[in-house]
Image (spheres, rainbow, N blue to C red):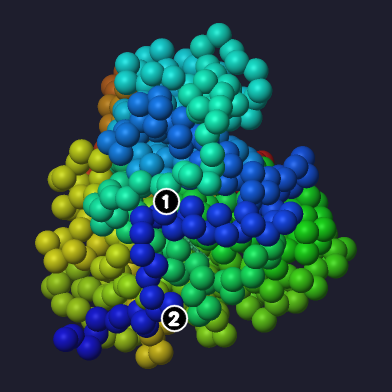
């Protein structure tokens, strides 16, 4: 055994038996028996769903899906902002073993088509807000048979309401008590398909299994790496459910019986008011919002004695901001998590009572980590910087229909190469210091340079283009482009920015500006040094967006 491979500790509780769907069913059934036990609250509207109603709705929908013809080989998609109804199709599909593709609700038509083409869902569950986009897209997809609107009671001409779908397909005398989730091989069976561009290239479909989910559930109730189980505990979350961070923390909360107070859009006052009103004990933030709260004067106006934990993940959190936020909220420390879409959820987490400022935590149970010198392949020891690699039971099954990309990120021995540079100290606490893969993180959202480069190259006046991330205090990073203009053509920075903006969702806009150069040196982060050397570079767009985008 190599002493420089670090293993997570044995779990406090053994891994529960059963598929992710069976485990959820068991837990939700248990909490449904507690009178008035609230599963979800919408912080904006103050509406609730009880565990009892969640059980009823998910079982009825699962039964309806089966009657409609959805099987363990089928895929459905959910394209919605965070809402009370979001998890109803996700959980129903988990019960019966259909895979769910969680689609970014902010995607435009082009992005939606690309993303849905990866998973090819038979049904799409959308919201009133995303319906106009989904409607356009459905006409261009021959595999999608039906669209169901989650939050509307009325049927439209070409979509059905959730209520009506259940009414049409679930027997009137269906008895929830007789419902049983399906059993299948959890190691292989795909539970969810999320999007990530991985180390390079275009966004891909990340296939995560029921075993991956079961491991996340065990972390969630682990007293060292997760939360103490106490049904009714209120958790506030504004993290998008379609992203791995939001998806797997929230699914985990259902297994603990927590009251999940959700927000679909970050509003400072409502966020703080909700922390106070629901006596929230734990909340999740991305570093952009941590930076915001480090300075927000409003925090002091609220009485928050119940708040015990703020957890941050999805992007680097500086030591200073972490400490400032902990101080503002009168907490001892901030819990950090580090993960990739390809590892399901966090694989490094701050263990209870072991915070080290600036560290993303220690290896979780069921996982191993090593730091590798990329030039020599040598496994490095403490305090030596290299690429972080992970092996364990939450590593994805692979990318949908893309063995080449899967083999490029997971090697023959099963190690996933994160594309992040970092080290661990003598106490096995990890520190992330840089990213070597070709991914930009704008407010925690992935932006794939290859996608923006592809768009730039379709411009009739652009000969070559390179996209990179440049540091930004508020957003972490912003995408910036270097462009080579075809001889005899004229192009302004504004032209280029608008051209890209017209084809991408907001997070991918070229907020870092555009620089015109004579040729693009090949390599993924080549523009970065160039950018810094040119201090006169014009940044086109000061960040006027809301912190949550
Ligand atoms: P994806 N510090 C620095 N970089 C980080 C980071 C961190 N703490 N976390 C992620 N990154 C960067 O969009 C790295 O470059 C996620 O971000 C993701 C997915 C699932 C779960 O995926 C990395 O290669 C989580 C993040 C997660 N983060 O925290 C928690 N979950 C968590 C926290 C508290 O593909 C890239 O982003 C409690 C429980 C939790 F699960 C991966 O980007």
Query: In the rendered view, would you say 415 is above or below 288?
Result: below
Left or right of 292 in this view: 486:
left
Considering depth in this image, is 399 or 320 the residue closer to the camera? 399
Residue 484, can we see it?
no
Q: CA distance from mark 1 to mark 2?
A: 22 Å
The residue carrying mark 1 is 21
- Hey, which residue is sitting farthest right in the picture? 301
Residue name at image x 16 percent, y 45 percent = 403
The image quadrant where one finds the C terminus is top right
- Total label count? 2
Left or right of 44 in this view: 177:
left
- Hey, which residue is sitting farthest top in the picture? 157
Q: Position of residue 347 (x, y in %)?
A: 39, 68
| Disc 2 Cβ-to-ligand 1 distance below 8 Å | no
Residue 418 sits in quarter: bottom left
The image quadrant where one finds the N terminus is bottom left
Classify mark 1: residues with Cα within 10 Å, few (<14), some (14-19) or many (20+). many
Query: In the rendered view, would you say 113 is above or below 326?
Result: above
Q: Give the secondary structure at mark 1.
A: helix
Residue name at image x 18 percent, y 64 percent = 414
Q: Nearer the viewer, mark 1 or mark 2?
A: 1
Considering depth in this image, is 251 or 325 the residue closer to the camera? 251
The residue carrying mark 2 is 12
Please tell me which of labels 1 and 2 falls first in the chain. 2
Q: Name the disc covering residue 347, or none.
A: none
Q: Quadrant of ligand 1?
A: bottom left
| Disc 1 Cβ-to-ligand 1 distance below 8 Å | no
Residue 170, can we see it?
yes
Q: Position of residue 134 (x, y in %)?
A: 49, 22
Residue name at image x 80 percent, y 51 percent = 269
């Amino acid at each position: 055994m190599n002493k420089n491979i670090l293993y997570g500790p044995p779990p406090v509780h053994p891994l529960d038996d059963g598929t992710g769907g069976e485990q959820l069913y068991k837990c939700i059934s248990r909490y449904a028996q507690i009178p008035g036990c609230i599963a979800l609250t919408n912080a904006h509207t103050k509406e609730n769903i009880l565990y009892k109603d969640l059980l009823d709705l998910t079982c009825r929908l699962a039964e309806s899906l089966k009657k409609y013809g959805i099987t363990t080989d089928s895929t459905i998609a959910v394209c919605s902002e965070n809402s009370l109804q979001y998890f109803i199709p996700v959980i129903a599909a988990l019960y019966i073993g259909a895979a769910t593709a969680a689609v970014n609700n902010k995607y435009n038509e082009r992005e939606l088509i690309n993303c849905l083409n990866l998973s090819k869902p038979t049904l799409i569950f959308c919201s009133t807000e995303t319906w106009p986009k989904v409607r356009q897209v459905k006409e261009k997809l021959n595999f999608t048979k039906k669209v169901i609107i989650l939050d509307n009671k009325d049927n439209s001409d070409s979509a059905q309401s959730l209520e009506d779908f259940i009414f049409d397909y679930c027997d009137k005398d269906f008895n929830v008590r007789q419902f049983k989730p399906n059993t299948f091989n959890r190691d292989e069976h795909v539970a969810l398909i999320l999007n990530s561009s991985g180390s390079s290239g275009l966004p891909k479909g990340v296939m995560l299994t029921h075993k991956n989910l079961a491991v996340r559930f065990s972390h969630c109730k682990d007293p060292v790496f997760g939360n103490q189980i106490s049904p009714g505990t209120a958790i506030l979350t504004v993290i998008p459910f379609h992203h791995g961070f939001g998806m797997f923390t929230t699914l985990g909360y259902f297994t603990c019986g927590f009251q999940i107070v959700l927000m679909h859009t970050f509003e400072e006052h409502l966020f703080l008011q909700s922390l106070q009103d629901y006596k929230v004990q734990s909340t999740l933030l991305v570093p952009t919002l941590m930076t915001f709260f480090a300075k927000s004067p409003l925090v002091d106006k609220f009485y928050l004695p119940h708040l015990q934990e703020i957890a941050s993940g999805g992007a680097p959190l500086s030591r200073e901001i972490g400490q400032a936020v902990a101080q503002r909220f009168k907490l001892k420390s901030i819990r950090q998590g580090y993960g990739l879409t390809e590892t399901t959820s966090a694989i490094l987490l701050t263990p209870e009572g072991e915070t080290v400022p600036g560290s993303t935590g220690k290896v979780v149970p069921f996982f191993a980590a090593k730091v590798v010198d990329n030039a020599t392949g040598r496994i490095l020891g403490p305090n030596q910087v290299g690429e972080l690699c992970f092996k364990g039971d939450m590593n994805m099954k692979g990318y949908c229909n893309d063995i080449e990309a899967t083999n490029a990120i997971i090697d023959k021995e099963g190690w996933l190469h994160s594309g992040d540079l970092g080290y661990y100290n003598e106490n096995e606490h990890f520190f992330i210091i840089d990213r070597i893969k070709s991914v930009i993180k704008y407010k925690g959202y992935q932006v794939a340079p290859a996608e923006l480069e592809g768009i730039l190259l379709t411009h009739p006046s652009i000969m070559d283009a390179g996209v990179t991330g440049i540091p930004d205090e508020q957003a972490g990073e912003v995408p910036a482009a270097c462009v080579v203009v075809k001889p005899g053509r004229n192009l302004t920075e504004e032209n280029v920015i608008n051209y890209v903006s017209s084809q991408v969702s907001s997070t991918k806009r070229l907020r870092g500006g555009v620089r015109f150069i004579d040729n693009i040196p090949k390599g993924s982060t080549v523009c970065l040094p160039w950018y810094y050397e040119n201090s006169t570079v014009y940044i086109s767009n000061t960040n006027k967006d809301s912190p949550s985008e």
